[in-house]
Amino acid sequence: MKRRNLLQLACSAALPTQLWAASTDAPRMLVVFLRGAYDAANLLVPTSSSFYYEARPNIAIAKAAALPLDDSWGLAPAVADSIHPLWLKGQASFVPFAGTNDASRSHFETQDHIELGQPDEGGRDFRSGFMNRLAGVLGAGSALEAMAFTDQVPLILRGNLPVANQALRDLGKPAISAAQAQAIAGMYAHTRLAGTVSGGFEVRDEISREMAGEMEAASRGAIAAKGFALEARRIARLMRERVTLGFIDVGGWDTHVGEGGATGQLATKLGELGRGLALFADEMGPQWRNTVVVVVSEFGRTFRENGNRGTDHGHGSAYWVLGGGVKGGRIAGEQVEVKAATLFQNRDYPVLNEYRALFGGLLRRIYGLNDTQLATVFPGASARDLGLV
């Protein structure tokens, strides 16, 4: 195996810092990326908008079915037993009209845009994701451990700092065999990376053994065995004990056909996601008060339903901000009345709360970052504090 390929495998398996337990009061952040562009208008329902019901004769969620949040917004009943209780406890907020200025409506283009966190204009450095830059700013030698709960290290966590990844859905097929791990560890045995590489393999093996046992125990037809809910509990245990900066992506949100309303395809997915997030919060225990979960998607969907009772690629979305220390129970950020005249290009939610500004405000609050540090994470952006934490 070539040295370059071995190094790539080593970096994906090794943790970026020494392998100590995270401090019990260290801030924790988990970013959940809904790949495929979920339909925000059927999660955060604009119940005061008559246009919403005109534009979606077959898939709108009836005002009587939506869970009231304030005079303008309701919540999909699919998350009645999961996210709504967090809202009632002041541990959940939503930011509608959120997203990126990228109007390409391309899944891949916009996902890359968000994960890189780089300026809208100019070239892009695909070797530098914003969460990797954040990990670097937070500092080598700290108790920080960053991890992607994905098959490969995603763009958002690629960069100068080696970051671990752990696939949660295919535990029986490790990306690196025992022989490969031994070869890589031997190659770096007398270098400055020796401890990081060998330690990373040890932790990976430990996690894989633990998770494989849990998967077997949960195989009695438990609905969580194949879904996000089971992964969420595992992620919570890791973030409670070791990982302080995490990322996971959840796919399947591209609802062009047969989206459904209060029930149906999207409602089922939202229900599964909501239950997973509620289980994550529960599993975090006392650490939930130090944890912030941000749920994002590459863009929203067309406000009007299409001819297939679905929705197509749009622009503005709605982000979720959850956590035990969140100033929740709020619809935050700049907003506009939902009507035909306020749609972007007469079809989509506009973006009024740019994602880099939104994240910048959160990071300032969570980690106390100064302007110079924030400029490293999001060059060219101005942080906007929405008072969410």
Image (tube, helix red, strand yellow):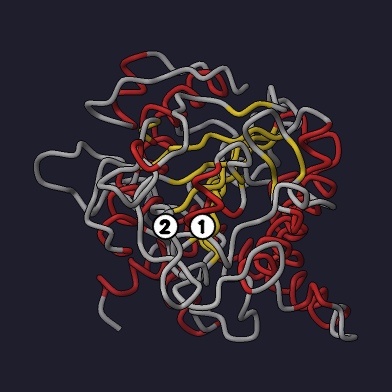
**Front residue of this view, candidates 239 and 4:** 239
Q: Left of 81 or right of it: where is 101? A: left
User: Could you tell me which residue is drawn at 51 percent across and 43 percent down?
Assistant: 318
**Front residue of this view, candidates 192 and 10:** 10
- Mark yes or no: residue 193 visible: no
98 vs 4: above or below: above
User: Could you tell me which residue is drawn at 83 percent across and 49 percent down?
Assistant: 283
The kind of secondary structure element at disc 2 is loop
Position of residue 280 measured from the top left corner of the image (x, y, whole percent): 76, 51
Q: Left of 8 or right of it: where is 50? A: right
Dot 1: within a 10 Å radius of its alpha carbon, few (fewer than 14), some, or many (20 or more) residues? many
Residue carrying label 1: 39
Position of residue 352 measured from the top left corner of the image (x, y, whole percent): 37, 31
- Mark yes or no: residue 287 visible: yes
Task: Choose the circle earlier in sequence order: 1 or 2.
Answer: 1
The kind of secondary structure element at disc 1 is loop
Q: Quadrant of the N terminus?
A: bottom left
Q: Quadrant of the C terminus?
A: top right
Q: Amino acid at mark 2?
A: Arg
Q: Left of 351 or right of it: where is 295? A: right
Residue carrying label 2: 301
Q: Amino acid at mark 1?
A: Asp
User: Could you tell me which residue is drawn at 57 percent across and 23 percent down?
Assistant: 366
Position of residue 134 measured from the top left corner of the image (x, y, whole percent): 41, 35
Position of residue 249 measured from the top left corner of the image (x, y, whole percent): 52, 61
User: Could you tell me which residue is drawn at 22 percent across and 56 percent down?
Assistant: 104
The answer to whether the residue labelled 1 contacts the one labelled 2, judged by CB atoms less than 8 Å apart, is yes
